[in-house]
Image (cartoon, rainbow, N blue to C red):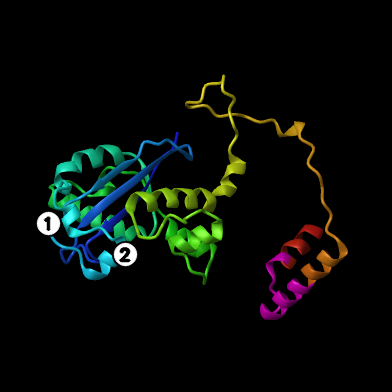
């Protein structure tokens, strides 16, 4: 069974090493790619003011944060919640760096010591959409995720949006999942499917599709000086 936590932070500025701190932590839980509703959300007193540019991004006033808990006061709850989960984060290096600094200041080990892997959706998006804008807002627009309520950055709202974006980015994986009926056990079950009972259709390419394919291969032959891999495999198959 797969437990994932989609996570986002808001901070006083851009540099944890230079003293900036986390002011909001928002986490959304996915279990087997489904939202569970078991979220974690804290506003945090950073012990310092936010930079002016950061305030324009998140809109969380210094006055609002003054009576909120410090990170050290909630660190045990955060660690318990995140333990063992895969973290899904957009631009993960930023949030992980800040959380590791907060954990260090509170006398705790870094994230890597108690969570599973960290998946960076920004890196995923760059690989899937090279050369395009891959901010959270851009991905929401591209993947048709409703972000109309996002006028300012907020950690919990952004985590909820990112969960939707992540599911859309990885939706092709759904075809590999087999739904187990409600009366069957769900824990530790591997479902075997006899593919012999399926008759798979063979779809033959149309003449214009074959011609277009040959045109592309011709361009590849020219640029690779006749070393097109597809041609080489095809000739071996015929031989």
Q: Tell me residue 58's x, y (percent).
A: 30, 60
Residue placed at 51% from the left, 25% from the top?
186
* Residue 25 visible in the displayed image: yes
Residue 216 colored magenta? Answer: yes
Q: Residue furthest right?
A: 207
The quarter of the rendered structure image containing the C terminus is bottom right
Q: Residue at x 51, y 63 (%)?
A: 127
175 or 51: nearer the viewer: 51
First in sequence: mark 1 vs mark 2: 1
Which quarter of the rendering shows the N terminus? top left
Q: Quadrant of residue 114?
A: top left
Q: Residue furthest top?
A: 183
Give the residues drawn in magenta, as a range. Answer: 215-230
**Residue 5, image x and y in percent?**
37, 44
Q: Which mark is residue 31?
A: none
Is 32 placed above or below 9 here?
above
- Identify the residue at image location x=36%, y=41%: 85
The percent coordinates of residue 171 (x first, y second) are: 56, 48
**Would you say residue 173 sits in the magenta stretch?**
no
Identify the residue shown where x is 31% and y is 44%: 115
**Circle 1 sits in a helix, a strand or a loop, which is it?**
loop
Q: Which mark is residue 47?
A: 1
**Measured from the top left, where is residue 142 in percent x and y?**
55, 61
Q: Is residue 239 left or right of residue 67?
A: right
- Residue under label 2: 57
Q: Nearer the viewer, residue 75 or 229?
A: 75
């Amino acid at each position: 069974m797969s437990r994932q936590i989609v996570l986002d932070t808001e901070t006083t500025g851009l540099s944890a090493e230079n003293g900036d701190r986390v002011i909001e932590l928002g986490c959304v839980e996915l279990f087997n790619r489904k939202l569970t509703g078991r979220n974690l959300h804290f506003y945090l007193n950073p012990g310092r003011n936010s930079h002016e540019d950061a305030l324009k991004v998140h809109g969380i006033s210094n006055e609002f944060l003054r009576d909120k808990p410090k990170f050290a006061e909630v660190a045990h709850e955060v660690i318990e919640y995140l333990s063992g989960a895969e973290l899904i984060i957009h631009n993960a290096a930023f949030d992980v760096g800040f959380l590791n600094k907060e954990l260090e200041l509170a006398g705790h080990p870094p994230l890597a010591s108690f969570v599973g892997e960290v998946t960076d959706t920004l890196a995923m998006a760059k690989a899937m959409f090279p050369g395009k804008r891959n901010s959270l807002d851009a991905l929401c627009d591209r993947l048709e995720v409703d972000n109309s309520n996002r006028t300012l950055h907020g950690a919990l709202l952004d985590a909820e949006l990112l969960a939707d974006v992540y599911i859309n980015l990885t939706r092709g994986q759904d075809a590999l999942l087999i739904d187990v009926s409600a009366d069957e056990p769900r824990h530790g079950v591997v479902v075997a499917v006899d593919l012999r009972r399926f008759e798979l259709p063979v779809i033959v390419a149309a003449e214009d599709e074959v011609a277009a394919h040959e045109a592309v291969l011709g361009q590849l032959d020219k640029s690779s000086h006749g070393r097109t891999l597809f041609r080489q495999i095809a000739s071996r198959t015929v031989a």
